[in-house]
Image (cartoon, helix red, strand yellow):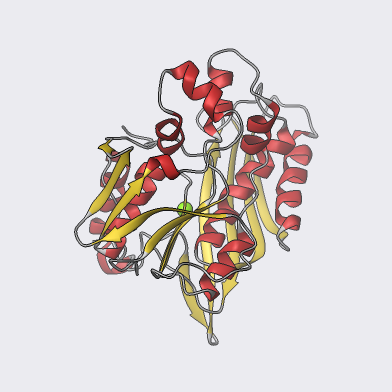
């Protein structure tokens, strides 16, 4: 049984089965980071794989950007618990046929993403294989970590930044070049480390990063806290190119943004009074925590059933 219950979906059913099989050998699964108490503070750890053809394509992004994105995805999990990064360990699998130098370009991207949030490359591993796989393990420290559980009925639901970086993916998939703003949001997401730490100290009750999409990640936050989340999609702050790509897909723009991952923003619950001033990132209130279960999404008052990205759906 997961220490932090997850929302619905085949990917998460598989994770539940792993947790059930391991039992007491894996007692802390289900949050954005593993948290170990060390000398009065908390060591935060997380690991993520980025797989060519699944998470990225080399004709869409440069190798530096692929490295940056892989590192930013891990660092975003540190942001979600309010941790300060120490850095990243990177296991690289590179096609045996690839020219030397590709791994250097990729690791420059990893290092640049770590540097922007005060972290370093701490170590790694290099192997030859059939495709490119970048597995990033991040390490950080938190004085008072925030978890996915902890939201209380009456809390507000807030999100940092803007959503809809999947607009770039939609453009590429349709054979078009993305608008510059949406390409930048996809290629170089900025991990919300400063905002995560600030929110942890500003009375936030629960937090998760939006790696899989608002619809699914809101359901995780609800399951973890044993509460319901009501989200008004018309309130979503939308990023560059979202309106254009949503129109091309024949979908309301907020629904388009809520279905997709790739954003690496934070979804956070705060007491009814809202956050104090001085947030290092824009914060938008998009809903309310209620008694019950699951995430209920509405657009202009009408319920919408949306699915997020799931590797096994
Ligand atoms: Mg996460």
Residue 68 vertical position relative to residue 290 in the rendered view, above or below: above
195 left or right, relative to 37: right
On the rendered structure, is 311 left or right of 105? left
Going by the image, does 16 lie left or right of 231? left
Residue 135 vertical position relative to residue 52 in the rendered view, above or below: below
- Would you say residue 76 is visible in this rendering? yes
Residue plotted at (74% across, 56% down):
116
Estimate the x, y position of residue 304 in percent, counting from the top left: 28, 35
The residue at the far left in this view is 292
> Residue shown at 40%/23% (left/top)?
251
Quadrant holding the C terminus:
top left
Residue sitting at x 70%, y 48% = 110
Give the quadrant of residue 254. Answer: top left
Please tell me which residue is depicted at 55% across the width and 79% down the height of the picture: 143
Quadrant of residue 272 within the rendered picture:
bottom left
Q: Give the image location of residue 119, x and y in percent.
A: 71, 62
User: How far across and down, in percent of the image, does residue 225 sit?
Assistant: 29, 64
Nearest the viewer among 128 and 59 is 59
Q: Position of residue 136 (x, y in %)?
A: 59, 50
Which residue occupies the extreme bottom position in the image?
A: 40
Whether residue 83 can be seen here? no
Q: Nearer the viewer, residue 82 or 133?
A: 82
Q: Which residue reaches farthest top?
A: 175
The number of discs equals 0
Above or below: residue 267 compared with residue 253: below
């Amino acid at each position: 049984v997961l220490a932090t219950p997850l929302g619905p979906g085949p990917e998460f059913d598989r994770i539940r089965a792993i947790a059930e099989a391991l039992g007491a050998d894996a007692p802390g699964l289900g949050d954005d980071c593993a948290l170990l108490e060390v000398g009065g503070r908390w060591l935060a750890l997380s690991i993520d794989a980025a797989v060519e053809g699944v998470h990225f394509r080399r004709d869409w992004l440069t190798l530096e950007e692929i490295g940056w994105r892989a590192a930013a995805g891990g660092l975003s999990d540190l942001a979600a618990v309010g941790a300060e990064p120490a850095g990243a360990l990177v296991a690289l699998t590179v096609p045996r046929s690839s020219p030397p130098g590709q791994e250097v370009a990729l690791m420059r991207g990893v290092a640049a993403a770590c540097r922007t949030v005060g972290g370093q490359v701490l170590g790694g591993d290099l192997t030859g294989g059939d495709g490119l796989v970048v597995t990033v393990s991040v390490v950080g420290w938190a004085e008072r970590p925030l978890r996915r559980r902890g939201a209380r009925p009456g809390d507000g639901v807030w999100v940092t930044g803007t959503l809809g970086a999947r607009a770039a993916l939609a453009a590429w998939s349709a054979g078009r070049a993305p608008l510059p703003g949406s390409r930048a949001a996809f290629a170089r997401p900025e991990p919300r480390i400063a905002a995560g730490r600030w929110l942890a100290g500003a009375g936030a009750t629960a937090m998760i990063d939006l790696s899989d999409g608002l619809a699914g990640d809101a359901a995780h936050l609800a399951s973890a806290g044993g509460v319901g989340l009501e989200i008004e999609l018309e309130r979503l702050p939308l990023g560059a190119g979202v309106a254009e790509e949503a129109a091309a897909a024949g979908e309301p723009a907020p629904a388009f943004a809520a279905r997709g991952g790739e954003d690496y923003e934070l979804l956070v619950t705060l007491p009814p009074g809202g956050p104090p001033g001085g947030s290092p990132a824009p914060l938008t209130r998009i809903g309310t925590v209620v008694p019950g279960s699951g995430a209920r999404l509405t657009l202009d008052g009408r319920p919408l059933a949306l699915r997020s990205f799931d590797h096994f759906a």
